[in-house]
Image: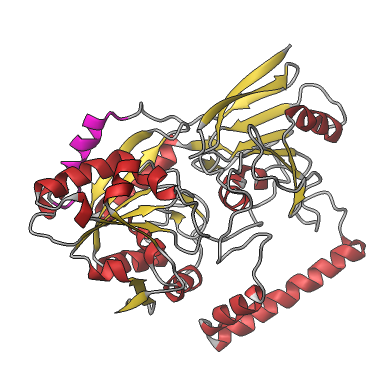
Amino acid sequence: MSSRIQLRSGAWYGDRQIELEIPSDWELNVHRPHTPPPLTDAQIESSLDRPDGQTPVRNLCKGKSRPLIIVDDLNRPTPADRVVGLLLKYFSEAGLPPERVTVLMATGTHGDPAPDAMSKKIGVEAAARCRTIIHNCFRGAVRMGTSSFGTPVYVNKAVAESDFVIGIGGLNPNHTAGFGGGSKLALGVLGIRSIFRLHFGHPSAGWGSDGTESTFRRDINEIAEMIGLRTVISLHVDENREIVAIQCGDSRKYFPAAVKFCRDAFAAPSPGDADVVISDAYPNDLSLTFARMKGFVPLQSCKAGASRVVIASLPEGVGLHNLFPFVNVPRFHRQRHRLRRLSMMTPRQVASAVFSKVSRTLTSSRRRSGGSNGQGPESGLAFKNPIRLFRPGNQTPALASAIGGIQLTSSWEEIIQAIKSEQNHRTNLKVVVYPCAFLQSLQPSTESTGKIPITEHSGE
């Protein structure tokens, strides 16, 4: 006999349901979010008619001639097509047919999207009729000034040339800002100098923290205003990537309430003393780079001896984040990265960074020479067991069986057998499952000791 878990996989590439078997003598705990039911098209339109701090879009676009819609890319689960059709209807009523509307995909420093990415994001008809642009942070940005925080503001030329800019994006946990979304959508259409300054000119808020009053959020709010992004539509999706809530209007006004909604609806306990932690990277399992960046958080918060499993289809393979590359690091990236960071630091900050680096090196050296028992967070070997990644469904593109310390397999039975071996074939293993780890905000746990803090990644 066995227990069964119903999960999702393959965001943007089928969004299919999968079923996994767990041995019946294991204690299974599935931490599902508490979200309202999906919204109908009528409910979405009703929300657009009640924006925060603004008049409705159907009124704002009147008298405009060069409207532009910013949408996030496929590395975010936002089903923008549910809203784009309504916006095009409003524009048409204002005398602006789809052919006069520009849609700009906000890729930030992400790699080039697949050829059909725009059709998937905004719908086939809108992609065919509107003027569509994929942002490139390395080319074609124009200077719009400097924010009061000292950030040089370079933005996609199409944004600068528009007389009405509106954005559609998601609102999800984020390392840099605590939560992305709202005005942070503007970051996706900025030039590399602006993006770099935003990421490294402010302290990181930490995954899933409030961050609404951080210097990063205040800076990006100001930049959004400078580039004309004063109206943003934020969509909340559930574990099946269905829209369950929507905010629109002035994101500075609705953002705190939007963050509270996310933190309440997607709150989940930390793994605590669980023996097995299963993290489903859906709906952010497009590539290994982004699954690792967004869907591995529960695996970084468990006890040292836990077995760690990720579920991710990875239909776009390894993927690429130019600011935080994973295994496909461009030549001289680290050197350029360090020079950019040094260019934004004061002499005092440089001295402090050097001191911290030397201290970490000395501590690591003592650990290797036998100063630690290697069994806890104080040790150089934080986790005993590797991360095992299960790729369900059609395994394309082909990937190596081990990448960056992560072991990949398409056999769930292989995963189960590996867990049994790692846990010395004990019964009554405590198993925790996070069905949509990318969306979930982990709450502190008091159940265990020796948990490892999140240290593997601090970007984006």
Q: In the image, is residue 201 above or below residue 386?
A: below
Asked if residue 274 can be seen in this view, the reply is no
Residue extending farthest top: 1
Residue drawn at point x = 67 percent, y = 80 percent: 354
Quadrant hosting residue 442: top right
Q: Nearer the viewer, residue 287 or 3?
A: 287
| Image quarter of the N terminus | top right
Q: Nearer the viewer, residue 427 or 156?
A: 156
Residue extending farthest right: 370
- Give the number of callouts: 0
Q: Position of residue 340 (x, y in %)?
A: 55, 80
Q: In the image, is residue 254 above or below residue 21?
A: below
Q: Which residues are magenta?
A: 39-54
Residue drawn at point x = 20 percent, y = 46 percent: 88
Residue drawn at point x = 80 percent, y = 68 percent: 363
Q: Position of residue 297 (x, y in %)?
A: 60, 46
Q: Is residue 53 left or right of residue 321?
A: left
Quadrant hosting residue 432: top right
Quadrant hosting residue 188: bottom left
Q: Is residue 250 magenta?
A: no
Q: Is residue 43 magenta?
A: yes
Q: In the image, is residue 187 above or below residue 17?
A: below
Asked if residue 305 can be seen in this view, the reply is yes
Q: Is residue 179 left or right of residue 332?
A: left
Residue drawn at point x = 48 percent, y = 40 percent: 12
Residue extending farthest front: 128
Residue extending farthest bottom: 347
Q: Position of residue 306 (x, y in %)?
A: 75, 39
Q: Nearer the viewer, residue 91 or 230?
A: 91
Q: Position of residue 71 (x, y in %)?
A: 35, 52
